Amino acid sequence: MKRIILIGYMGAGKTTLGKELARVTGRPFYDLDQYIESRTHMTIPQIFAERGEAGFREIEKNMLHEVAEFEDVILSCGGGTPCFSDNMDYLNRQGETVFLRAMPHVLKEHLLMGGSRRPLIQGKSPDELIGFIEENLQKRLPFYSKAKHIIDIDVIHTQEQINNYANLINEKVAN
Ligand code: S3P
């Protein structure tokens, strides 16, 4: 079976749904950010602080090329992963890419619910956050839209919704 690769903006639910999809399918789960942190022994905010975003993107690309070679896995990428270098074309070669598409207000709600250790949105007020998401998402949509599958995501509150979305993704990639 092909790898299933979840992409989409910060707060779309890539990690949450990826874990559930792994549980539902019995496949191993990898989260690219967590993989980067364990391989570099640094947190994502530390990498941004010490190497800048450009340094992070370089590490991210290198780590992506390790983790996306594992067989039969569920992989959640970082929000920016598909939008730099030739990563999106690489992802499409490596597996069934699924864009978790969510409106800015949904992303904002998830990000506020989750609290944030994300360097790109650190310290933003809720108003600044929605403005940033709207602008940044526009730039990223052309990359995300190259995914082989798209799933529309609404605000997620319950475990039942998480399970339903995971099943939906599983059905989509099978067809
Ligand atoms: C980023 C998203 C983050 C993480 C880093 C940069 C982005 O991942 O990779 O903070 O550029 O959108 P999540 O989408 O899992 O928050």
Image (cartoon, helix red, strand yellow):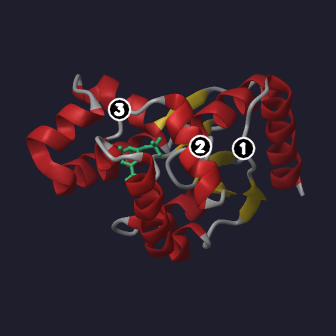
Residue 143 x %, y %: 51, 71
Q: Nearer the viewer, residue 165 or 27?
A: 165
Q: Nearer the viewer, residue 28 or 118?
A: 118
Residue 132 x %, y %: 40, 61
Separation of residues labelled 2 and 3 (CA atoms)? 15 Å
User: What amino acid type should be assigned to the residue bearing mark 3?
Assistant: Arg
In the rendered structure, the answer to whether residue 99 lies left or right of residue 48 reads: right
Q: Which residue is mark 2?
A: 109
Q: Which residue is mark 1?
A: 155
Separation of residues labelled 1 and 3 (CA atoms)? 20 Å
Who's the residue at 14% across and 40% down the image? 49
Label 2 crowd bin: few (<14), some (14–19), many (20+), radius 10 Å: some
User: What amino acid type should be assigned to the residue bearing mark 1?
Assistant: Val
Q: Nearer the viewer, residue 90 or 124?
A: 124
Quadrant hosting residue 92: bottom right
In the rendered structure, the answer to whether residue 105 lies left or right of residue 135 reads: right
In the rendered structure, the answer to whether residue 161 lies left or right of residue 22 reads: right
Q: Is residue 107 above or below residue 22?
A: below
Query: Which is more N-terminal, label 1 or label 2?
Result: 2
Residue 131 x %, y %: 43, 63
The answer to whether the residues at label 1 and label 3 have Cβ atoms under 8 Å apart is: no
User: What amino acid type should be assigned to the residue bearing mark 2?
Assistant: Glu
Q: Which residue is mark 3?
A: 117
The answer to whether the residues at label 2 and label 1 have Cβ atoms under 8 Å apart is: yes
Confirm if mark 1 falls within 8 A of ligand 1: no
Q: Nearer the viewer, residue 105 or 54?
A: 105
